[in-house]
Structure formats: structure tokens, C-alpha cells
Image: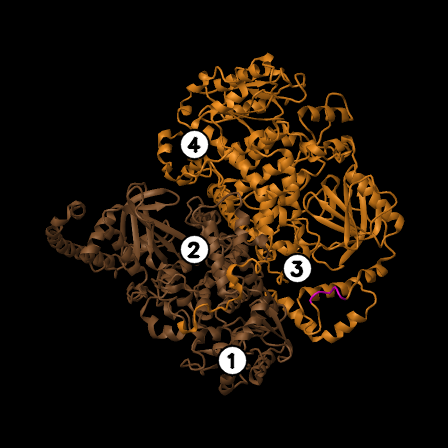
Amino acid sequence: MRMFDGRVLLKQVILLFWPLISTWVQGAEKIDSCQLQVLEMLSSLGSAGGKSAKPSFVSYVTPEEIKSEKEPSRKEKHPDLLPGEVVFCSASTVLKYTQDDLSQRGVFGVLLCTNFRVSFVSDEEPTEEMGQLFKNKLYGENDIPLSCVDNIYGGSEDKRKLITGGLVKNKYPSKMIIHCKDLRVFQFSLSFSKEEDAKKIFQGIVHHCLEPKSLRCLFAFSYCENTSYPEAQRKKQTVMFDSVEDWTQDMKRTKGNCRVVSENSNFELSPKLPQYFIVPKNVSDEDLTKYQGKGLPMWCWSHHSGCALFKTASIPLVQEDNVPQTYMEKMLTAVAHNHLYSVKTEDLSDTLPTVQDILLSYNKFKQFFLIDNTTEFWMSDMKWFSSLDNCGWLDIIRQCLQKAVEVVESLEKENTNVLIMEEGGSDLCCVVSSLVQLMLDPYYRTLLGFQSLVQKEWVAGGHAFLDRSNHLHLKDKVESQSPVFLLFLECVWQLQQQHGPAFQFSETYLTVLSDSVHVPVFTTFLFNNDGHRDSLLRAESPHTQRSPLNCPTVWDWSVQFDCKAQDLFTNPLYTEKPKQDTSVRKSYRPRHLRQLSLPSSAFKTPPKKGFFKDEADNLKKILGVKRLSRWMLSPSSDSPQTSSSVREFYEAWQTKPLDYHGLLLPCLDGPSIRVWMQRYLRWIHDVQILGGGPVAMLSKVSEILGEVQELQRQLDRHGCTLTSNHKGARPRAKTAAAVIAARSSVRLSSSFPFVTSRNWAFKPAIPTSLLQSLMVTGMPGNLADREDDGGPESLV
Amino acid sequence: CKQISVAKVYSSIPLPLKICVAILINIIYFYSVCFTYQWNLVVYTGAQGFKRRTTVTTKGKRARHGYVTPLLWPSIGYFEFNVMTCLNLLTAKDVTYICPYIGALRGTLTVTNYRLFFKCMDREPAFVLDLPLGVVSRVEKIGGASSRGEVSYGLACKDIRNLRFAHKQMEDSLRKSIFEILMKCAFPVSNGLTIFAFEYGQVYPENGWKVYDAQAEYKRQGLPNESWRITKVNDHYELCDTYPSTLVVPVNIPDEELKRVAAFRAKGRIPVLSWIHPESQATVIRCSQPMVGVNGKRSKDDEKYLQTIMDANAQSHKLFIFDARPSVNAAANKMKGGGYESEDAYQNAELVFLDIHNIHVMRESLRKLKEVVYPNIEESHWFSNLESTHWLEHIKLILAGALRIADKVESGKTSVVVHCSDGWDRTAQLASLAMVMLDGHYRTIRGFQVLLEKEWLSFGHRFQLRIGHGDKNHTDADRSPVFLQFIDCVWQMTRQFPAAFEFNEYFLITILDHLYSCLFGTFMCNSEQQRVKEVSKTVSLWAYINSQPEEFTNPLYVNYSNHVLFPVVSMRHLELWVGYYIRWNPRMRPQEPVHQRYKELLAKRAELQKRVEELQREVTNRSASSSSERAGSPTRSITPVQTFV
């Protein structure tokens, strides 16, 4: 506080006139906005009131007081509606509690429910803050897109009850708590609005957020019908993998040697198969359709050595029936033929948690961050670490990363083809294959590369986004709901956290992407697969039969953010690849060198479950025992694989100098897997580090990066001006980086850019449960009771 | 080479011949001693001659295991040899270091009076273990001869690691000799030898003992002023032998009264000023517990004294007394004559207990932590295991306590009194942390040195007892990681405010390493009184640190003057200091990508600036020749930046 001289002066003035001010404040029956401002200022100045003032101004203003003043409310308040957005119902004089404390503090306003969102419009005039830099164009900080609503609780006084939909008739709770999928928590009090309105808005919100609906009701369709959206511009950015060229291009880039299948371009083979895909050369046309695409090895990525990663949906094996087994065997031969006649299969269903496990774990995990009040928060703080362990979410992340490392090892060290499979072929397969590609291929660590990776593996790859996020609240789909994509982003975040300079995109980008899944505007996350998307968009098209409805993809970030905000998506630590070493790929060094650098095996850890089983084991399981010798010719299978090889692989990699444009492996040891602070803690007021957090660091880096870029530009300009003799001292365009830096990082908090520190009270959050020290009981030998000086006094 | 062969022969020959051989060995030994001395001399002069160069080359070369050690300390002499130790040095050629991460390594073990040095040439690059003997807390023999005929001994270290060495058993006496020499050198105090810091003769450009001058530091805070004076009453440590000679007390209290107050405070540690707020005049006062006792004794002088402290701050009519202990412990202290201020006796004072546990609890917690993090981490239950050590919980409580103090001083403009039982452990932690939060000066490299010198060293944190320098009694109940906890708390703050501290993580680690190393005299002794007598002969750690400040500088540092830091003390934001506690684990690659990238960018900016300026000069020259009209140098469009590099 001491840094703002003006404030100090003001403080002095206020102090001088304190007696006057205090009588004025306490005597006032109505509180107008001017007074409120002064009060807020006072409260933000700490206890400027000296002896008599309590630190917050809660005591002066109760909701009732505000209410009496706000009674003649203006009903015509609306948020700026998006094209195609329709208001269903609204209620005025709803009190929105400010989340930061237990007090009955709040803001009055209008609560609306539209076909896109639940929106709260404050009665107070919004103050223009510079914090608007990172404003989402589609929804503001008081808006909740309907599909972002996670749970609604009805509460009265202390109790709260989960609302499940359908059951609410005529009754409405006085308090409504909304938990969002992006972990915001809203608390509204309906007790000040008209009964009719309150009932209507409550039932409306419950109906539109929780009741089953059809896909066509999703906002995307009405939005797209009402916006003209230019298609041309997106084409040159992210590779969408919706054409033969895109796939061919990608295969050429990785020097793959497979064949592109375009027979399914009109979904004639199977609507569940991607429009275009790549299979090993030896797969014949008849094989394509045999099991509706099940068991068909789909090419994901080729390693520069020639081996490749494939994924497939496994065929359920029937004991008596030999046909699928022979088919599977044929497919495996096809994969093996790709390179060196070797293949490893990995059934992810055996070793990784199921989608239900993932959901269960995440549901436990997210509860730590959906904080209703401060006391509860500090109560849970003491047991934070063990609760983290108990929910198992970080462990699932670790397992996925570990599996990916195993696959990477097979590709990189043993140069065998790898076929990963699971039941649907589009959940954990997507997680693992995308992670493998991120670790091995620096292209996917660029912003556009990452977007095409998601496009390739997840969107074209047929991850059932609609079922997994259950936007439609269908009762029969509750089972299939699961945050698999979020799990993937979590894994990426871990990688990004450990190897910052290797990624072009920032943490903020990942957070925003994880939020965008719940914004029902983008076609990217609305459908179950290519066929699904195609048929629906065609059916909904207002124009001709030929052109499908044109909807934005999430990659068109300008739909959500303006350019300056988008600059926060890039990571200032990212170093571009130096140009000269494109020819020298480090993996080309002879393999025996690698082996030499492995540490001695004297101290191996005990074998663990879940690593690659012996190749033979796996094949035996799938194919029966006979006729396997053909594939055993691969050189790597001679050396028996020890179970700790992944560990050794990591350690061998680690002893080499780190190349951010080469292979990246994550460290999986306990402390290395961490909680994604930005995503999970951003809305919790008590844990915001004011003036600190990563932004303090990154803003400095981006500041200097901006300067370097500016100098570079000047240099280039001078290069030209030297000849043309043109003066180059015109004002430079400020980059967003410079903008951030300009608002000095003291003012930013750890949850930047998501929460702006308005009304920034310089008040630390002091744990409320200090006295409940939990450890005293379990102390052995009553150490706690002993005196500080354990030794006899004579020692002194 | 000669020596090895002799040793082998010696150990393998039957007993009757040994006497003859012993004579032979004595002759060889005599030569070898001459040889070693010669060699030593060469090194000595070499090190002297190349002193500057060696410091230059070792710069930035962080030794693999954390110690930056100039290659050879000039004053290291090999231990006086007798036949046995001579043999010991010979056999030390074939010692196995059992590394928990890499495996068994075979190499040469050297023990000097400062350190233990192990080198294995089999690996590429050569494996080096360089351990100051001060770090060793315990040496023990492990088992008898194993099945492979090897004997081994373990070294428990104060810096969260255990080392194991083994060698082929040739004769029982061999093992004994290595064991004995370690026992002797690692615990000089117990063996009546001098600690190495008193022999270390490296000369640094700066005299580190000049870093802290109490008068100058109080002057920086604006003291003395109309309410506070500097007293000389403790000049000869008569008022309180664990306090510094310079004390700041209220103006209105004469020295005579101070003595009466001292009688009521444990160990005579009266309330004195540690820090004063430059604007509000709110103060941080530290002291020890009042001697209330079971009967609730009162002292009019003490009450008046605290009242005066409160009155010295016109902004507030309240005084907060922070008792660092849990209230139960504070109450239990009454049985021993201590206790806490009752709010009846001290009007307008509010007593708050901060629930920080005593040194024994902390020691136990660190022991558990060591079990969890060394040598290997169990992946599956990492967080539960971490929680069961309570280490971070203690860190949280200390930080929370300091935060409350800082908040009261900054936001409440109220003076605070901090004490625990004796006022040299928890009080030091709380007062110094609160000062780090409140005063940006203490977040600079020099300022932090001043803070340590002031709050920890001069106010009598008993380093000798808490660390046990050179003392073999490793179970001593006075040992406790109090200072380590404080540094950990500071580290937590640097994590939360990465741009607010001038020093980096390496600075903190270096301080902790030399807390144990016994190379510098800084952390010797228990009080200023003891230090004044003895330690001035040694080199100060700050001399070494200030000789190469760029090593310890945080490139991202922004000096926001008068900026108060309020860290978040939730467990969500606390994390285990991997760079310190788990640094021995090679899988935990130290990560400083941000700093590296920043340095790269700085270098690049400097380079580009140079090129731009050159070009601009060229442009100016050309255009000057063509036209004389030129408004303002184009260099103005570049932001003026001070160069860090």
C-alpha cells in the first residue's frame, strides 16, 4: 500500500476527518453509491479508521438496507445478447453473494436464463477496469453457459440439497448455489425477489441446465444460423484433418509409409470410422469393414526410424469363435510389416483406469476446489495432501504419462511398431497416443501443432465428446460421462510445467481450452465422431443440401478473445528451434551409445506391474499360442525386457543434455506431478497471491522478450533504411507482453489473467483454523510437552 | 603406485614376516611423507599463485552435489601420519561408495581435516563426492563382514543424506582406522581438536564481518528517534549474556529499570525493538517469556515497560503480544516459573498464541521427512507420506504466525511483542520472517545477511547447540532444524513472489550448506558474546558470498521499494523444497528454465542493442552528410534499460 503516494495522502485526509465521516456513515439510512465508494476505499485502506473501525465494512451494510434502496428496480436489464440468443426467464433483485467471505455481502441484480447461459446482471454500473484485457467475448464473469453448469444446490439457512431436476414443483429454495464445470461457484439468494419471479427463474434454470434435451437445442445451432462465419481464414491455420491432403501431408511430414483410406469420405464404410484415416499398407479393402472398424489398426504417427504408432478398438473375443482371432492376427501382421517385422501390443484397458474410474476420481478431486465458504476451506487445508492422495487423480495422470513413456521407449529405443488398443479405441488410446506424439515430436508442441494434434487424435479420431461431457443430460449417458479430454490436458500441463521452454503455448492456453469444452458454441466438442458431426450439420443447414451448417471451431480464438488476450496463449519461455540443426536429429546417433549410457543395473527397483508385458505374452493372449515365431525375429526381442526399463530409459535420457526440440520425458516421481494451480485455484480468493505467482516471473520475461523483438524489428528496419535513408523513430506498436508488463506485476495476482484484482484490499488471508492443530495428538513420546531446552541446564 | 603394492603385500603376508616388512614400510613411509609434503607444498603455492584464476574457473560450476569448493584449500594439510593412517590412505584407493541411485562405485577415498573426498574414475564423467566433514552427524559401522567379505560404514549427514562406504576386508584394523580417522576428523570438538573454520585461511576481497553494523542498521530504520534510544547497558553483556551489545529500548525507560525488567524475563531477555515501521512507527518487539510462574507473579516494571512500548506508537492504543507457543505449552511453562502475560495485568494488550511447536517436535518432523525423501521416493503415497511428516504443516504455522504479525504491524499499525519460551528459536523465526515480509531491504542479498546477523546471530540463536558443530553426540536433544525451517519459509516466499527477492534459491542452499560445513565462522558459537571473543579469526560466509554476488542474484528481481509481501499460507501453495531436500536424487533435475531463458534474453538484448546503436550511428553519419536537419537521436526510441549482464 505504501507504494501509492496518493493513497497515503488520501488516507491522511480521511484520518483527519474521521469523526465526521464515521458519523455520516453510521447515521445514513440510505447508502448511495458515492458513500459506498468511500466505504470501499476505507476498507481497502485497511483500518484507516484507526481505533474504532473494523477492518471490513460489512457491519454497516446489511442486505436489507441495500434492498430497501433498490426496491424500485429496473427490469429492463439485459446482458448483451449473442446472435440467436433468447431470454427464457428472468428475475430481478436477486442477491449474488460475493464469494470471498462468509459475510452476507453481496450485489443485487437481475438473474436471467437464456438458451445459452445463466446470466447475472449487476444493478451497479460496471466499472471500467483495465482488467478487462482477458475478457471472453461470449460470456462474462457473471455468466454461466448452460453446459458449464455442473451441479445446482438448493439451500436454506445452513442446509443445502443437490437438485437433480424434474423433482422441483412449486417450491424454490431461498438460496441457489451453482457449481460450474470450470470450478466457479455462484451463490444467489432469491429471497428478495418476487415469489413468482423467483419460482420461475429457479425452475427455468433447473430445467435448462439439468433436464435432458436434444442436441438441436444446444446453442451452437441457433448461434451459427445467425452468424455468418467466414470459412476461408481458418483453413490456413490449424490442420483440421478433414481431407485426404491433411492426412497425406502429416504422413509425409513424419515419413510414414502407410496408406490413406478415403473410401469412408461419405461414411459409407461405417459412420463410426473417421472420414479419412490411414492404415498399414498390408490391410486390404475387404478388411476395412469387417468388424465396423473394430480391430482395424489406425496409423497415428511415424517415428523417424520407420516404426509407427497405431491404435485400434479391440474386438471382444469370443472363446469359441476363431474368426476375430485370425482377423486380429492378420492385422498384427500388417502392422508388423510396417517396419522390421516387429510389433508390440498394449491393451490399455488392462493397465489404465477405466473411464468410470477417471470420472469418480475427478469428482472427488474437484470438490476440493468448489469452495462455498472460507471456514470450510481452511478446515480442509490441513488434510490437503492426504486428500490429494486419496482421490487418486494425480495418480491417474501419472499412470497415463507412464504408459506414454513406455510407448515412447518402444518407438525410440527399440524401434518397434506399437499398437495400442482399448475397447472403444477413442478414449485412453487418444490420451496415450497424443502424449506420445507430444513427447517425441516438437511440432506438436507449437500452438498450431498442438491444435492439429487435438484435431487429429481427438476430433477426427472420434473421441465421443458429446457422450463424455454429457451436454444433453441424457439419463442413459450418465454412465459414459468422463473427463478424458481434461485428463489429457492435465497430462500436457504436467509436461509443460516440467519443460516450459519446449512449449509454444502457455498454461493459460490450456486452461482456456479446458473451459471451452463446456461452451456449446464450437463444433469441436459437440459431437461423438466425424459421421455424427457431418450428419447433424447437414441436417441443420438452412441452405441447400450440399453445404453443411457452418460453425466455428474452438481454434478460431477470435470468437472468444481479442488479439491482445490471445497473446497470453503464447509462452514467453518458448525458444524457437535454431535453424541449423534441422538436419542433425539427435536420435540418429548409433544405438549402442545409448545403451552404454544406461546406469548400472545393480540397484534395480523391484518389478512393478503394468509395464509392457513380454511381447509373447500379449500375443499369446490375443492369438492363442501357435505361429508366433515369425515376429520374434525382431532384434530387440532378443534381450529380455526388464520391468524397470522405463525407469532406466528415463534416467538414461536425463543424463544427456536437455534438448527442448528433441525427445521430452516427464519426471514421474512424487513431487513432480503437481496440481494445476491456475486452473483449480483461480477462483478461490483466499489463495490468490497478490503481487506474486508465476505471472510476476513471466511478465518480466515477456517484457524483455518484447524488447528483444522490438530491437530485432528496428534492426531490420535499419537494414532497409540504410539504403533508403528513412528515419525509423516512429512509435512502436506495443505488444500485449508490454501491456502486461506496463501494469506492473505488483498489481497482478497468482490467478492472473482470470480474476482481476479489483477492490484490491491489501489484506492477507489468515487461516481461521490455526488453533486446530491436528498433529498434537499423534506425537510420539510427548515431544510436544517437553521444554525447548531438552538438554540439562548444565549444558548451557 | 608403489604404495598400493606395498599395502597389498603387507596385508597378505603371514604374521612372522610382518615385523620385517613393517620396518621396510617405515622406510617407504618416510619417503612417502616427504613426497606428500612436497606435493602439498606444490599445491599450496599453486593454489596461492592461481588463486584468482581458480575462483574464476570455479564460478558457475556448481559441483554435482551442491558444494562449490575452490579446488584445494590452501591450509589443508594431510593429517599427521602414523603407520596405521598411512596404510589407511593406501587402502583408501579401493573403496566402494554405495550410491543409492547409481549403484556401487569404486574409487579413491581421501579424508582431510576439512572434508571427505571420493572420486571414481570408472565413469564418464568421473564421479566425485565432496563432503565437508562438518556435515557428518554420525559415523557408524554397519554390520560385520558381509558374505562378500566387505566391511562397510555409514555416514548420516545433517543435509538429508546418508552415505555408505565399503571396502574389502583385509584386516580388521583397516576398517577401524578409516572409522577412527572419520570419528576424529568429523567431530573435532569432541576430540579436543579445532574446528576447521579456525584454520581456513582463504583471503577474500571483502571482510565479511563488516557486513553487519548494528548502529548502521538501526540508523537505516531511523533510530534513535524521539521515542526510541540505543542503550549501552549491555555493552559488556552484563544485562543479558545472550543479547547483543547494542539494544534499542524506549526513551523513557532508564537503564536501571531495564535491569528490573530483565529480572522478570526469562534469561534476562528483555523486550527490545527489532524493527520499526517507517511511517506508522509500529514496532516489532522481541523478548522471552515473563517469569509469571504458578502464582501469577506480576512485575510493575514489566507492565510499565510494555505500556511505554505501546505509547511509543501514537497510531494505536493496543498492543499485540504474540506467544509463538501453543497455549497448552505456555501454560505448562508456568510450572517452571515461566508463563505468559495475563491480559488483566497488561492493559490494552491482547495475547495471541501462534501454536508453533517446540524444537523437539521439529527435529522429529525432519527425521521423518528424511525417511520419506531419502534415498528414494515412494511414488504411490507421496502426498500422504509427506503429510505424515507434518513438516509443511509446521512451515505453514510459522508462516501464518509471521503473516499475522506483519498484518498487525502493516494493516493494523499496531506494535507487536513476539516471544516464545526463551526467545531465541521461534521468536527469531517469527520476527525475521515478519521483517522479510514488511521490509524490502531484507529481501536483498546484503539485507538478508544483515537480517541473519541481527535477528539470528546477535540475538543469540544457539547455532552451536542446535547444529552441534563438530560434536559427536548426535542424539543431543538440543539439536533442532530451527534455522533450516526459517530458510525453508523464506524459500516458500520466494516461490510465491519470484520477482521480489534479490537472491536466488542457490543463495539459500549455500547458506544452509555452510551452516553445517564448518568452513566459515559465521554460524559458530551460541551468542554474540562468545563470537566476539573467538570467531573474528575466522572467515565470514558473507565474504565468500559477496565475492561473487552474480552467482546468487535472481535475474528477475524487481525492487519495489516499500512493498509489503503477504504470502498465502494455505497448504495449496506450500510445497516441499525439492531443490534442497531431494537434491541428491539425480532424477530430480534442477529446473531453472525461467532464469536461464531470462539471462539468454538479456544477453540477446544487449547484443541487439549494440547492433542497433552501431547501425544508427551509421545512419546518422550518412544522413548527417546528406542533410543537417535531424531531430533527436533515434536512440531515444529505445527504452532506456540498465544492463544486468
Vertical side of B374 occupied by A540: above or below: above
Vertical side of A479 occupied by B98: above or below: below
Q: CA distance from mark 2 to mark 3?
A: 33 Å
- The secondary element bearing badge 2 is classed as helix
The residue wearing badge 2 is B506
Vertical side of B513 occupied by A417: above or below: above
The residue wearing badge 4 is A642
The residue wearing badge 1 is B249
Asked whether residue A232 is drawn in magenta, I would say no
Which quadrant would residue B589 be assigned to in this image?
Answer: top left
Q: CA distance from mark 2 to mark 4?
A: 38 Å
The residue wearing badge 3 is A760
Residue at 82% over, 45% down: A202
Pointer 3: residues within 10 angstroms few (<14), some, or many (20+)?
some
Q: Three-letter amino acid code at disc 3? A: Trp
Asked whether residue A57 is drawn in magenta, I would say yes
Q: Are marks 1 and 2 in one subunit?
A: yes
- The secondary element bearing badge 3 is classed as loop
Q: Are marks 4 and 3 in one subunit?
A: yes
Compared across the picture, whether A532 is left or right of B153 comes to right
Q: CA distance from mark 3 to mark 1?
A: 36 Å
Residue B259 in the image, given as x and y percentages of width and height:
49, 84
Residue A340 in the image, given as x and y percentages of width and height:
44, 20
Residue A647 in the image, given as x and y percentages of width and height:
45, 37
Front label number (2 vs 4) = 4
Q: Three-letter amino acid code at disc 4? A: Thr
Q: CA distance from mark 4 to mark 3?
A: 57 Å
Q: Three-letter amino acid code at disc 1? A: Val
Q: Are marks 2 and 4 in one subunit?
A: no
Q: Which chain is orange?
A: A
Our reading of the magenta stretch's main secondary structure is: loop
